[in-house]
Image (cartoon, rainbow, N blue to C red):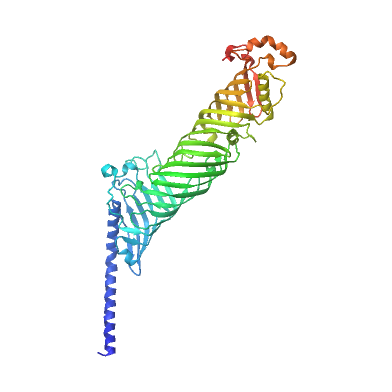
Amino acid sequence: MTVSRRVRISLWIGGGTLAALIITVSILVTHFAPLARGWVISALKQHYKTDVQLGDLQISLFPTVHATATNLVLNTPGHPDLPPLVSIRRFTLDARFIGFFRSPKRIRRLKLEGLQIHIPPKKARPILPQNGKRDSKQPGAPFVLEEIVADGTMLEMLPGDPKLPGDPKKDPLVFEIRKLILHSVGRYRPMTFRAALENPKPPGLIDTDGEFGPWNPDDPGDTPVKGKYAFSHADLSVFHGIRGMLASSGEYTGELDQIEVHGTTDVPDFALTAGNHPMHLRTEFQATVDGTNGDTKLHPVHAILDDSAFDVSGAIERGALEKHKEITLTAGTKGTEVQDFLRLAMKTPRPPMTGRISFDTTVKIPPGETEVIERLQLDGAFTLKNVRFTTPSIQQKVASLSHHAQGDPKDTRTNDVRAQFAGRFKLKNARLSLPRLQFDVPGADVKLDGSYALKSGDIDFKGTARLDATVSQMATGIKHLLLKPVDPLFKHDGAGAVLPIRISGTTGSPSFKLDIGRVFSRKHEE
């Protein structure tokens, strides 16, 4: 056979083979799209155990597998009245030819547009067999997604009774995810992710990364999640009555239904508008976030206001500060600087006193549109030690009371006198009530009952002062002699004198007076 003849035969064979290949590919492409559409629906239905709808699907196989589809919907199993478990407006996928036709299929990149995920309430989820344990041998997903890009995702946790979609008692918890990229290393393994979430109040962007999954088709709310987050430049002034720029970071772990969070917050310029004194507020916290409604339990929060530490615990319902919901907490400290708390709430340039405070109180913030300080309600007990008043005239009056009560009226020293306070308190409508206030200085034991207005600074107290000295011993010169006959009138139960007193005026200019109306009454006796 001549060379030219062999060449012609080879060309005929090659041409025939190419033609056959072209015809085969044409037939394959023509008939593969319906087959692929059926496979997608069947695979998703089997894995997620729910009805699946799919709109238009276009697919090409060369040089790599590329597909686009629209309107993919996975219904919530057993509850057609609820929003779909998953809906996707449009998706595109790319895969290598060999990887796409192996088992499980490997998809190199999946881009999702308009992804919405609705996690049903617990009561709407299927009951698991055998004491709630899943079958560990159930097959995994029939595909591996190496990368998912799903910017603009909406994740919604549905609350309430499944028979009442959109339970009017609670709004759904919605996460608007601006940026979302996930990567997978294989079946039965969690996907790593990086996301940016919009936080509605206070407004800001949360950057987070971690691990998500494997997806739990039996109970999506039990899908594991863990990671770390960073949140900065959150303007607290959107909450009426407070201001400051918040930053927070931390870690979280758990399931979509219940997430444990450990983190810190930092507000260098925290202030109540009532006092308008910026202070540095830092916290370290552990909390449980209920993924079904966003409610948060604090376990507790360790906070530092400038140099003063205190603890807060309790539960905060999601959106409580901006919606008509009550906040109820407990707070306390075993000994910290009272001036930091006073500076936060008062308009005066400096706090009226310094000292060490210990307190335990319940904290309630009822719903309303007024400032937080006007809605804040406290009910607790406190002790104040080593108190010194910052206004010289007030400190001088307290020191004078102590010196006179000890029978040394000529002593004019002021700085060495320290007072102690103790009692119960209630705060409501920006007025602090102190029904059983105990006030002690060397030589005097004072019991008072009254109130203090936080905004105006007005004070109004009355009570009795039990003194070591007699009335005459508190005077000098001729007054000392003239008062001796009335000493028996004020002596009582071993005290040198028991005097009815009244304190009024303002914190900046208080007035201490003998209550003349009760001088000859037995009401001042204990």
Residue 76 placement (x, y as % from top left):
31, 48
Whether 525 is drawn above or below 98: the answer is above
Q: Is residue 369 visible?
A: no
Q: Is residue 18 visible?
A: yes
Q: Residue at x 37, y 51 (%)?
A: 213
Q: In front: 149, or 6?
A: 6
Classify residue 345 by image quadrant: top right
Residue 346 drawn at (x, y percent):
60, 34
From the top left corner, tell me how far across and down residue 79 is, in percent.
Answer: 30, 46
Q: Residue at x 28, y 74 (%)?
A: 21
Q: Is residue 251 left or right of residue 444?
A: left
**Left or right of residue 44: residue 115:** right
Quarter in which the N terminus is drawn:
bottom left
The answer to which of 86 and 511 lies nearer the viewer is 511
Q: Is residue 362 above or below residue 403?
A: below
Q: Residue 146's image quarter? A: bottom left
| Residue 179: x %, y % from top left | 45, 55
Residue at figure coordinates x 39%, y 49% from the top left? 225
